[in-house]
Image (cartoon, helix red, strand yellow):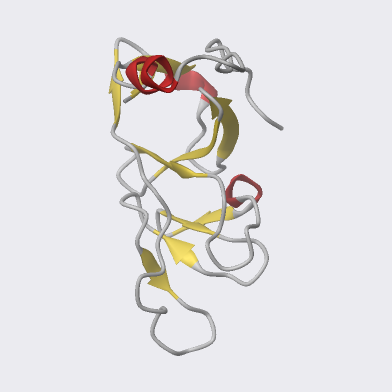
Amino acid sequence: MNAPSSIPELAPGLPAGLQHGLRNYWYPILQSEELPQDKPVGLRVLGEPLAVWRNQAGEPCVVRDRCPHRAMKLSVGRILDGDLQCVLHGLRFDGAGKCVHNPFGSMPPNGASVRSYPLVERYSLLWIW
């Protein structure tokens, strides 16, 4: 289930500079209570698909909602030891987007990562840059 986003999509046809400029601000994306400890949430902000979850310390994390292996939505995965695991092949990503576990026993592929974004929790809201 995707959480509703209060931030609209970027309008088609906006000049590239304006689109880039809209991204250089902090935006509230969820209320703190909308993000459970045990399940990721998928949403779209400024045209970007995002997966948001809480790590073992309860801190919120956010990455692009696409596994680099087969482009599966990470938001339909699960949280194991505070990391986000892809439901398809089990690759696991930390809050910085780094692949930290390969279930097939070998080391994670070099460069296997997913884009992460700055995220803070303040005033009962999750804010993304």
Q: Is residue 9 visible?
A: yes
Query: 117 or 77, which is in the foreground?
Result: 117
Residue 59 image offset from top left, x and y in percent = 32, 37
Residue at x-position 53% and y-position 22%: 34
Considering only vertical position in the picture, is 46 above or below 63?
above
Quadrant of the rendering where the C terminus is positioned: top left
Residue 120 appears in which quarter of the rendering? top left
Q: Residue at x 52, y 12 (%)?
A: 7
Q: What is the quadrant of the N terminus in the image? A: top right
Answer above or below: position of 41 versus 88.
Answer: above
Horizontal and vertical percent position of residue 91? 52, 69
Give the image location of residue 101, x and y in percent.
42, 73
**Horizontal arrangement in the rendering, residue 89 relative to residue 125 (left or right):** right
Q: Is residue 102 left or right of residue 129?
A: right
Instruction: Examine the image and state in which quarter residue 94 appears.
Output: bottom left
Q: Position of residue 55 (x, y in %)?
A: 37, 47
What residue sits 40% from the left and 53% below the top?
Answer: 82
Specify the quadrant of the image occupied by residue 126: top left
Front in this rendered view, residue 94 or 9: 9
Whether residue 125 is visible, yes or no, is no
Residue at 56% over, 27% down:
47
